Image: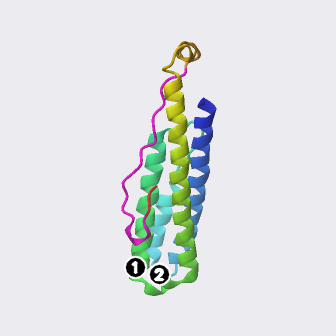
Amino acid sequence: MDENINNAMLQIGVQVSSRWDALTSLLELTKGYAEHEYKTIKETIQARRSITKGSSPDDVIKQANIIAEAKDKIIAVAESYPDLKADSTYIKTMNAVNQYEKMISTSRLIYNDSVTKLNHSIRMFPASMAAGILGFSKRAYLEEQNEKPENGRGTA
């Protein structure tokens, strides 16, 4: 059960990384329209951290907040440039970013289900005794964030 939780966190990490890559591609499309905004958002993206096996739900939430901020800035640039917003590559890339958001949401459900199973199991006798001896303890859930779904925004 612990390995399932670790695996679920790794899957979230892979999807967060892919989401960053798609967001970076989206950012590259804005470069020709708004150089200053491009540089600012690029610095935010370069400061990212990865989600790994040892990551906590708080790490995932921090990443989601950074991604949401960068995405909102890119969307704001696109709103100012109708040609960019209408560009087919921009639309496809934004769809990819949104698809990764949905995949992360699904992985979050799998993670939380795995946490539920472990937390329930370590409270039951005799597993609770073995869990205590082996150092297993209750794991934290990955809480859903309340982001606004308008203007192409989704959940983290």
**Percent from the top left, x then y, of residue 56?**
49, 38
**Residue type (three-letter) at the residue carrying disc 2:** Lys
Drawn side of residue 49 relative to residue 14, left or right: left
Q: Secondary structure at mark 1?
A: helix
Q: Earlier in the sequence, mark 1 or mark 2?
A: 1
At x 48%, y 30%, the residue is 139
Magenta stretch encompasses residue 148: yes
**Percent from the top left, x then y, of residue 150?**
38, 69
For label 2, the residue is: 85
**Percent from the top left, x then y, of residue 32?**
52, 81
Q: Are marks 1 and 2 in contact (CB under 8 Å)?
A: yes
Judging depth in this view, the residue of 154 and 128 nearest the camera is 128
Magenta stretch encompasses residue 124: no
Judging depth in this view, the residue of 12 and 71 nearest the camera is 12
Residue segment shown in magenta: 136-153
Classified by dominant secondary structure, the portion drawn in magenta counts as loop
